[in-house]
Image (cartoon, rainbow, N blue to C red):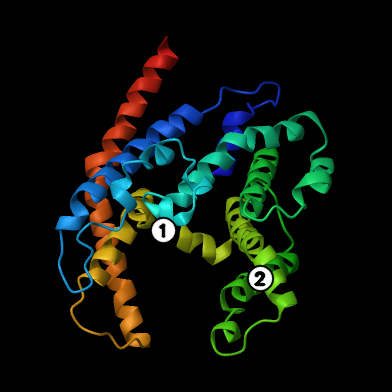
Amino acid sequence: MMYEDDKETFTGNGDDIEEDTGPSRQLMLTPPYMLVMMVYIALFPYLGSGPIWKKNGLENNYCKDTWWYNLLYIQNFRPITDQCFAWAWYLANDMQFYVISPILLLPLYFKNAMDYFNNYYIKPYTRMGPYLVGIYTGYILYKIKCTFKINKFVNLLLWGVFTAVACSVLYGVYDNYNGKPFSTEVASLYNAVHKTAWGAAVCWVIFACATGNGGFINTILSWKGFVPLSRLTYSAYLIHPVVIQYYVYTRRQMVYVDDHQIIYDFLGNLGLSYAAAFIVSLAFESPMMGLEKVIFKRGQKK
């Protein structure tokens, strides 16, 4: 995403900075977001029943006083108990990062990129770490035009390093959740770096595949079957907590949680979320994307 944004921010020869695409991005993301939230708030309380079903819904006061925070993407400044559509805090973060990212890119345009990296990028900004890594990776890909040959040994070494990093982030907390809690120092270190470390591992996969150093991983990730699924990702993100909440709150019996139950729950929720996302995408997202293309094409012609 950041590579595409960098291309739109810096023109081909690096002499001009193009118009910000913020309004276009907001036009694409906001209508499906608001429509799904509206339907969820209005209809969800009436869709199920059960001993733990919340008849008044899960949102505080039906979001009557807080919905506009979501519209402006600033709900993450409120306590989580007062937020509407609470899992959309990520969208607020993402939009805020997107708005200020041109400010972070301007020094790259006017001064040496490595100076900016040394003076700013490596500083410990916790939440923005992965986004900053994405910005810089996108900038590098833009500058090298996705052409960069890596020695086979170095390539394998880097794949090994970033695979180890990703596995450490994912499985490094196993003992912590199985009766052997981290020390304060280890917990602090993990909390400070794990998001950025994961972002770096993901960015390595993107960089390697984009520059022709991805091997069979690039072949797998380039499978055309992922294309329709990728177009449903945003809608799936919006709708999947609704699917999970419905599943949990309509239960009428106790559940024994084991590995098999978790696998079935995961696969069932995944399948239902994408099925619902397909409907949401057809009803809300695709029409708005089509409208966006019409509006911006007309604007370009004028």
Q: Please state which of residues 119 and 146 is positioned toward the viewer in this rendering.
A: 119
Task: Tell me: residue 247, above or below residue 212.
Answer: below
- Horizontal and vertical percent position of residue 22: 50, 30
Residue occupied by mark 2: 165
Residue occupied by mark 1: 223
Task: Tell me: residue 157, above or below residue 179.
Answer: above
- Three-letter code for the amino acid on which mark 2 is drawn: Val
Image point 65% across, 59% down: which residue?
A: 196
Image point 36% across, 88% down: which residue?
A: 258
- Horizontal and vertical percent position of residue 2: 58, 43
- Horizontal and vertical percent position of residue 264: 29, 79
In the image, 301: left or right of 120? left
Image quadrant assignment for residue 240: bottom left
Dot 1 lies on which element?
loop
Give residue 213's mark.
Answer: none
- Horizontal and vertical percent position of residue 235: 33, 50
Residues under labels 2 and 1: Cα distance?
25 Å
Q: Residues within 10 Å of mark 1 (few under 14, many from 20)?
A: few
Q: Do the numbered discs 2 and 1 sit on residues whose CB atoms are within 8 Å?
A: no
- Three-letter code for the amino acid on which mark 1 is drawn: Trp
